[in-house]
């Protein structure tokens, strides 16, 4: 295969190599049929782009890539050439904001450390008993090897769902279940959480970064947490008073207010922390 010149052409080459090999992308699972349909050759839009890059100077090369990413000729999915190209450009040119072209942006929740602004508390309505939550923390209802299952507005118990709003979380303190004996209502607890790990996805911020049509009001203000919540991050449980203010009725003796908040890294680094290649391959084997 012809090798191109350094710079943006080199990024093109590297992206195509990853695309042809369908290189592992932690947090994204290639499907069985996707692997079968995956092309290892340059389709017409790539040949056109390669030809333009070969005959251009370095600044024109950058503009060609920008226009290609803004256009509709490059296929866009989790294992497309376009996806690998944005990934490589972000790695090789970290000061040029290529991540703006990522059509699957992820915004992770970042807690503030002491000395900065006060903590942003999260809330969770749950049937989990406080004795268990304070001893063992909170675990995911369902685990997935695909980050999109966690980032979706409707995540269906994937991760540990929390809200920035105590009022919204309070709606989930009771559940109605039906069995052959009839309809039953169960009442649970409203937890206050001082989350300081870096694996929480801010759903509203993520969806707003992906589409300008995402509503800014009327949402669950959700932070969906991967890998669970440590007991030292659970402040306690309580209720909402008549003014809608959270009132604690039981403190968690294992809560540690001094635990330092982890710093959120870039998307690729975060996904490597969350999903190992071994986990991804094991998940793919089940497809």
Image (tube, rainbow, N blue to C red):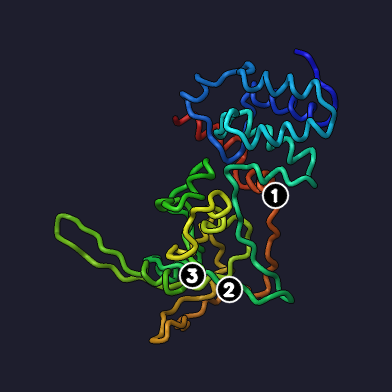
Is residue 33 left or right of 12 when viewed as pictured? left
**Disc 3 or 2, which lies upstream in sequence?**
3
Where is mark 3, residue-wise?
A: 123
- Residue 54's mark? none
Q: CA distance from mark 1 to mark 2?
A: 29 Å
Q: Image quarter for residue 208? A: bottom right
Distance, label 3 to label 2, CA atoms, is 15 Å
Q: Residue furthest left?
A: 181
> Where, by quadrant of the figure, is residue 59 drawn?
top right
Query: Is residue 89 or residue 169 the one in the foreground?
Result: 89
SS for tag 3? strand
Q: Residue at x 74, y 37 (%)?
A: 89
Which tag is nearer the camera, tag 3 or tag 2?
A: 3
Residue at image mark 2: 255
Q: Earlier in the sequence, mark 1 or mark 2?
A: 2
Q: Nearer the viewer, residue 253 or 103?
A: 103
- The residue labelled by disc 1 is 266
Q: Is residue 225 above or below residue 34?
A: below
Classify 124 as above or below 264.
Answer: below
The quarter in which the C terminus is drawn is: top left
Front: mark 1 or 2: 1
Q: Residue at x 56, y 33 (%)?
A: 76
Question: For the residue labelled by badge 1, is the local secondary structure a helix, a strand or a loop?
Answer: loop
Q: Residue at x 57, y 32 (%)?
A: 72
């Amino acid at each position: 295969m012809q090798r191109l010149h350094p710079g943006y052409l080199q990024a093109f080459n590297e992206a195509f190599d990853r695309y042809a090999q369908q290189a592992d992308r932690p947090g994204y699972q290639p499907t069985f049929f996707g692997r079968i349909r995956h092309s290892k050759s340059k389709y017409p839009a790539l040949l056109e782009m390669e030809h333009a890059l070969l005959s251009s100077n370095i600044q024109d090369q950058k503009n060609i890539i920008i226009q290609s990413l803004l256009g509709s000729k490059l296929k866009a999915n989790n294992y497309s050439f376009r996806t690998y190209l944005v990934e490589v450009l972000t790695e090789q040119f970290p000061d040029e904001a290529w991540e703006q072209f990522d059509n699957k942006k992820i915004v992770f929740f970042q807690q503030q450390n002491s000395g900065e602004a006060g903590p942003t508390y999260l809330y969770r309505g749950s049937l989990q008993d406080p004795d268990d939550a304070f001893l063992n923390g909170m675990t995911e209802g369902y685990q997935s090897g695909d980050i999109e299952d966690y980032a979706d507005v409707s995540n269906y118990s994937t991760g540990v769902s929390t809200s920035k709003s105590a009022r919204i979380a309070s709606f989930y303190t009771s559940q109605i279940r039906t069995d052959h004996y009839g309809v039953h209502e169960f009442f649970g607890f409203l937890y206050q959480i001082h989350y300081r790990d870096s694996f929480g996805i801010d759903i509203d911020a993520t969806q707003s970064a992906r589409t300008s049509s995402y509503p800014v009001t009327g949402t669950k203000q959700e932070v969906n947490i991967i890998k669970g919540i440590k007991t030292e991050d659970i402040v306690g449980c309580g209720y909402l008073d008549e003014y809608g203010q959270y009132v604690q009725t039981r403190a968690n003796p294992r809560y540690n207010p001094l635990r330092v908040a982890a710093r959120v890294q870039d998307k690729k680094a975060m996904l490597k922390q969350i999903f190992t290649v071994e986990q991804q391959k094991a998940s793919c084997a089940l497809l």
